[in-house]
Image: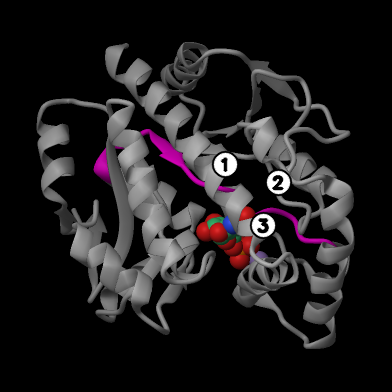
């Protein structure tokens, strides 16, 4: 087995069988600017503690896989420059070479599985990018959801993605996409979209039960829970549409490709909305952390 460095609180929760919620770190290093990134990461961890679960933020630091970061380590990671963005493809290579990297949704799911953690809260997942029919840019997050048994709570998918194609790939890959408490598939900054979610559940207990049943039925893979942003915190899709289009055409003009695409778009949208996108982003991540904690508690009780 690979060597894992657990934070003190995660080690203690694991030994007592208490509920733990995994958190990614790419959102810290590539998704939000410093110092808000560190403040938000600490706040989200506190939200999980307040809800009665233990947060486990994942990262690779100097070739060691950390499950749960101590406060000073989180601070250093949030400030550091040139941290790698790790997905399934480069996760093991980073450990092998003694590197430092932040985990995407895909890599966080792998780390969670290694640590026996079944629930994970994030903001948005990667998906099928606009123009994927020529770029072939489909996030490894979708394929990870198809094979790694972790329930991921996100706020739906961003409009930087081709959301209908993202839902099609999830369906093909056999990933349950569950809207929480509504029929519509949430659109990240907006609580609803024109698309129906394939599934709907209204309680954390149901989501936990479905997660367990998939394991008992030997169906590999996880679940995607799409949790709508609280209505008073949302940004209307009409306001964001032209901004997203501008960010996308800038990315195309500059020939941005591969793993640079998502961080580039997020950064440009932050700048073009004068930071408004970040405020909504923070609200929805916190909301997802609270729901993930409830699901983890239900799973621990099963
Ligand atoms: N989408 C967001 N915010 C994010 C990301 C995606 O709304 O921070 C990050 C997550 O870490 C996700 C990764 O796993 O980007 C996906 O990158 P890619 O599209 O290169 O697979
Ligand atoms: Mn990609």
Q: CA distance from mark 1 to mark 3?
A: 11 Å
- Foreground: 70 or 201? 70
Which residue in the structure is indicated by mark 2?
Answer: 189
Helix, strand or loop status at disc 2: loop
Can residue 260 be seen here? The reply is yes
Q: CA distance from mark 2 to mark 3?
A: 8 Å
Which residue in the structure is indicated by mark 3?
Answer: 277
> Picture coordinates of residue 17 (x, y %)?
17, 25
> Picture coordinates of residue 160 (x, y %)?
76, 59
- Foreground: 149 or 297? 297
Helix, strand or loop status at disc 1: helix
Can residue 88 be seen here? The reply is no
Residue 245 occupies quadrant: bottom right
> Picture coordinates of residue 224 (x, y %)?
58, 34
Tell me whether circle 2 and circle 3 mark residues in contact (CB < 8 Å): yes
What span is in magenta? 115-131
Q: Is residue 19 above or below residue 262?
A: above
Which residue in the structure is indicated by mark 1?
Answer: 284
Lower position in the chain sequence, tag 2 or tag 1 = 2
């Amino acid at each position: 087995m690979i060597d894992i460095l657990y934070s003190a609180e995660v080690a203690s929760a694991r030994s007592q069988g208490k509920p733990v919620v995994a958190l990614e770190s790419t959102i810290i290093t590539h998704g939000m600017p410093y110092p808000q990134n560190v403040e938000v990461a600490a706040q989200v961890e506190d939200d999980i503690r307040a809800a009665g679960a233990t947060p486990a933020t994942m990262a690779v630091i100097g070739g060691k896989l950390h499950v749960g970061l101590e406060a000073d380590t989180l601070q250093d990671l949030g400030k550091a420059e040139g941290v790698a963005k790790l997905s399934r493809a480069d996760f093991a290579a980073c450990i092998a070479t003694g590197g430092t990297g932040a985990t995407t949704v895909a890599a966080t799911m792998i780390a969670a599985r290694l640590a026996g953690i079944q629930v994970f809260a994030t903001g948005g997942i990667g998906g099928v990018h606009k123009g994927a029919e020529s770029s072939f840019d489909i996030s490894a997050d979708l394929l990870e959801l198809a094979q790694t048994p972790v329930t991921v709570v996100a706020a739906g998918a961003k409009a930087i993605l081709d959301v209908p194609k993202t839902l099609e790939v999830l369906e093909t890959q056999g990933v349950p996409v569950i809207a929480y408490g509504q029929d519509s598939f949430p659109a990240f900054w907006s609580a609803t979209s024109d698309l129906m979610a394939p599934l709907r559940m209204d309680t954390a207990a149901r989501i936990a039960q479905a997660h367990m049943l998939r394991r008992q039925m030997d169906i590999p893979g996880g679940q995607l829970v799409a949790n709508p942003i609280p209505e008073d915190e949302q940004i209307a899709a009409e306001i964001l549409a032209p901004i997203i289009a501008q960010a996308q055409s800038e990315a195309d003009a500059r020939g941005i490709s591969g793993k640079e695409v998502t961080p580039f778009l997020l950064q440009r949208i932050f700048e073009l909305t004068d930071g408004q996108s970040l405020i909504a982003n923070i609200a929805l991540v916190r909301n997802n952390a609270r729901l993930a904690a409830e699901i983890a508690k239900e799973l621990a009780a099963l």
